[in-house]
Amino acid sequence: MTAEPSDRTIILHLLRGAVPERGDEISALWSQYGHAVEVAASTTGVTMNADATRIRLDTKTIDFFWLLGFSAWRAIEVYSPALVLATVTGMPLDQALGVDAERGQYEFDYRQRIASAQSLIAAEQTADIAWPTDVPGPTPDRASLGDVQHMVAFDLVALALAFALLHEFRHVMFCADNSAPATLPEEEIACDTWAREFITSGLAAYAKTHGHNYAQVQQKRAMGTALAAVIIHAMTPTHAHWGNRQYPPIAERLTAMIGGYSLPAGSSFWLFTACLLIALMRQENRPLDVVANSNQEMVEILLDRFR
């Protein structure tokens, strides 16, 4: 009888699958640090943390990534019509949102899904919440989803989860090597930056070797990282959004994960990320009197507005 893989091996396989061109490197680091992966009993709050000897998480937090990720993917259908109108005509974004007569029901449904995901944080276990009927349940079998949109969301959620786990693994490395930055907020940003670099560097050789389009691979990785930023934003306690002794300001984390990509102006990354940021701004009732001539410019302005 074949033994079931350990939780540590399952997480390693997820990381290798998300960043295959660096599979040997992550396997070597996994062996070098010898840390455990501890799957804790689900409880209220979010469980995903690390120290020198282990990464700790629970299945409810993984479900949270899935549900919020699948829900946030729908931001495109909610906000892209107004975004296109604003960037093409030079109309302020808030006016364009007002012109989009069909947005109301789409946005209501979107907020219901996001609220369901956020309710997971306060719940003791996933079964305690009402799972949206139009969001499939978590599964490791991508092909079983059938729907193309669900498959795309699956890929982005896998990348977002890989980002978060790489972030935690960097904490392991800092603790084990006794090389952490001087403050916890600095360490958080350093872990974000390392995880982003791990996911997005080395793509050219990988794309060439496997016959993929480099720009498309880069775009997908960047979109997964942007989704991770939104999920981490939701996981961060509201009182810590402006920063404290433990967390850096959430605007700094969003910029570390989303800002500075050299993707083409027409990349879907800019459209997707702009819609994600518009959704966050709307959730927080922030003003959206923004005039931008492109999706990229919109992302840059909205990131600045979060500061």
Image: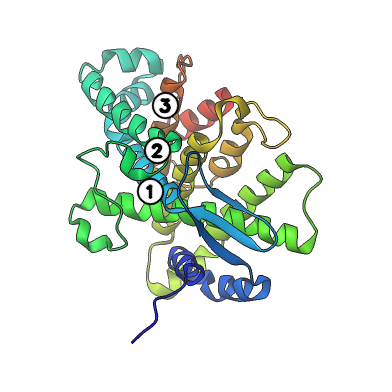
Residue in the image at 38% along x and 39% along y: 272
Looking at the image, is mark 3 or mark 2 nearer the viewer?
2
Residue beneath disc 1? 63
Q: Dot 1: what SS?
A: helix
Where on the picture, by quarter, is residue 197?
bottom right
- Residue 48 placement (x, y as % from top left): 54, 50
Between residue 263 and residue 81, name the one nearer to us: 81
Q: Are marks 1 and 2 in contact (CB under 8 Å)?
A: yes
Between residue 22 and residue 296, name the one nearer to us: 22
The CA distance from mark 1 to mark 2 is: 8 Å
Residue in the image at 44% along x and 27% along y: 280
Residue beneath disc 3? 278
Q: Is residue 245 above or below residue 262?
A: above
Q: Dot 2: what SS?
A: helix
Residue beneath disc 2? 120
**Mark 3 vs mark 1: which is more N-terminal?**
1
Q: Mark 1 packing: few (<14 Cα in 10 Å), some, or many (20+)?
A: some
Which amino acid, mark 3? Ile
Q: Mark 2 packing: few (<14 Cα in 10 Å), some, or many (20+)?
A: many
